[in-house]
Amino acid sequence: SRDRSTRKDRHRKINTAKGPRDRRMRLSLDVARKFFDLQDLLAFDKASKTVQWLLNKSKAAIKEHVAASKGKTPASECEERISTVSENKRKSPLASPKVSRRAAAVRNMR
């Protein structure tokens, strides 16, 4: 059998702002179940119709998100996320030094 990296990618790409992207999407099992349940509920025969319906229904929320994030730079968003994670770690009982030492001891045993 041929190595996956040497096979030719025969699927069409679409050009986006971030360069060429594969049209196919891989969904987690949970998301795929929900997606296909929605597709059945809407009685659409094609996944693209379901995605188009979702995009149309979420248009206002997307615009709101874009407007809210326009004032932020990627660096400030990153700092905001890091501070939130740090705060959550401080609040978490798993962040205590005893747990960290135990976790390190278990890791060293492996």
Image: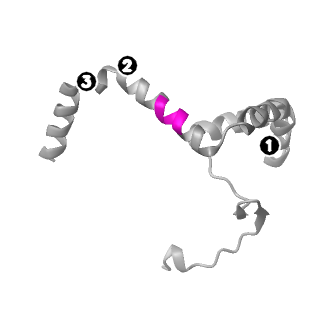
Magenta-span inclusion, residue 50: no
Q: Is residue 19 above or below residue 65?
A: below
Q: Position of residue 46 (x, y in %)?
A: 83, 47
Q: Gap in Å between the C-alphas at discs 1 and 3?
A: 44 Å
For label 1, the residue is: 51
Which quadrant of the figure has residue 44?
Answer: top right
Mark 1: amino acid: Val
Q: Residues within 10 Å of mark 1 (few under 14, many from 20)?
A: few
Q: Gap in Å between the C-alphas at discs 2 and 3?
A: 9 Å
For label 2, the residue is: 91
Magenta-span inclusion, residue 82: yes
Residue closer to the observer: 56 or 78? 78
Element at label 3: loop
For label 3, the residue is: 96
Magenta-colored span: 79-83
Mark 2: amino acid: Lys
